[in-house]
Image (cartoon, rainbow, N blue to C red):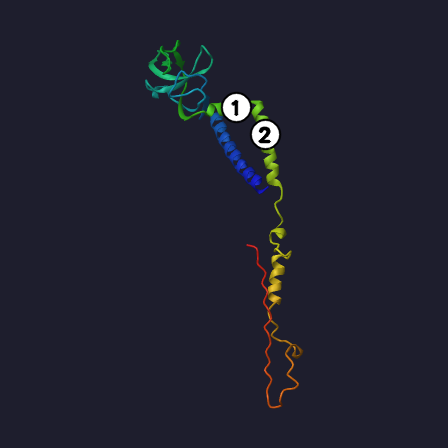
Amino acid sequence: MRVLRFFGNALLWVVAAVGLASILVWAGTSMGYLKPLVVISGSMEPGIMTGDLLIARPHDPSEVRVGQVTSLHSEVTGNIVTHRVIKKDRAEDGTWLFSMKGDANKSPDGEVYEVTGDVWQPALQIPGGGRVVARLTEPSVVIPLGVTLLALMALTLFPGESRDRRDETPDGRDEADGADADQTAEPDQTAEPDQTAEPDQTADPGETPELEAEPAENESVPVPS
């Protein structure tokens, strides 16, 4: 039971850390500071693999340089394309025009990307992170995981062994009783006269009888550490 409770607490800490990270990412995304991107094609392999998770940040188009990896919205597919910039121009109306190409592709992209606002560039790459995110959104994974998590949370709420039971000594007494026993086991310094040895009635009047009293045994009870 203690082992299960330990793993349950450890899992709760992991889930709490993941939850905190998710909240921070969500807050950053809502405020426009971050954009998580899941790579769904291999056009940038081997540098960026399918299933990787990219955390992109906004940049001014004027700061983008040819050769940098950039994420731009495609008017053709409706998705965000993360490729390498191979050409950069600016139209008379101020619109930025970007041409890009995937590292694994033989030819450039078939469209010119028109940008009027900020562009996104990957600041962090988590290998395989996109697959994890995708799996966690599937009901076949979320439901069993949620049930397991709830069971572990309930397990950690169970009360442990009582303190009295942990403090109980091997012979059934608790530590307090054991301490009392040690204190009362001291030899009585004020023993009554009838507890001393009687003098030998047949001894000579001139002899003084020797009184030898055996000391009382001081019993000690092992205290569980």
Q: Hey, which quadrant is residue 206 in on the image?
A: bottom right
Q: Quadrant of the N terminus?
A: top right
Going from the N terminus, do you reach mark 2 or mark 1 first?
Answer: 1
Image quadrant holding the C terminus, namely: bottom right
Asked if marks 2 and 1 touch (Cβ < 8 Å), the reply is no
Drawn side of residue 24 relative to residue 175, left or right:
left
Q: Answer above or below: position of 210 versus 93.
A: below
Name the kind of residue labelled 2 in the image.
Gly
- Within 10 Å of disc 2 (Cα), the crowding (few <14, some 14-19, many 20+) is few
Disc sitting over residue 51 in the figure? none
**In the image, residue 128 lies at what x, y percent?**
45, 24
Kindly identify which numbered label has been placed on residue 135. 1
In the figure, 145 relative to 185: above or below?
above
Q: Kindly identify the residue that appears in the image at 57 percent across and 39 percent down.
A: 4
Residue 25 in sight here: yes
Between 71 and 170, the residue placed more toward the observer is: 170
* Count of marks overlaid on the render: 2
What percent of the width, then of the height, locates residue 100?
A: 37, 14
Q: Secondary structure at mark 1?
A: helix
Q: Does 76 sit left or right of 203 as displayed? A: left
Which residue is at the far front? 202
Q: Which residue is mark 2?
A: 146
Residue name at image x 50 percent, y 29 percent: 22
Q: Report the amino acid beneath label 1.
A: Arg
Secondary structure type for disc 2:
helix
Residue 159, quarter of picture = top right
The answer, for residue 97, to whether it is visible in the render is no
Q: Are there few (<14), some (14-19), or many (20+) residues within 10 Å of tag 1? A: few
Residue 8, x across and y down, in percent: 56, 37
Separation of residues labelled 2 and 1 (CA atoms): 14 Å
Residue 14 on image: x %, y % = 51, 35
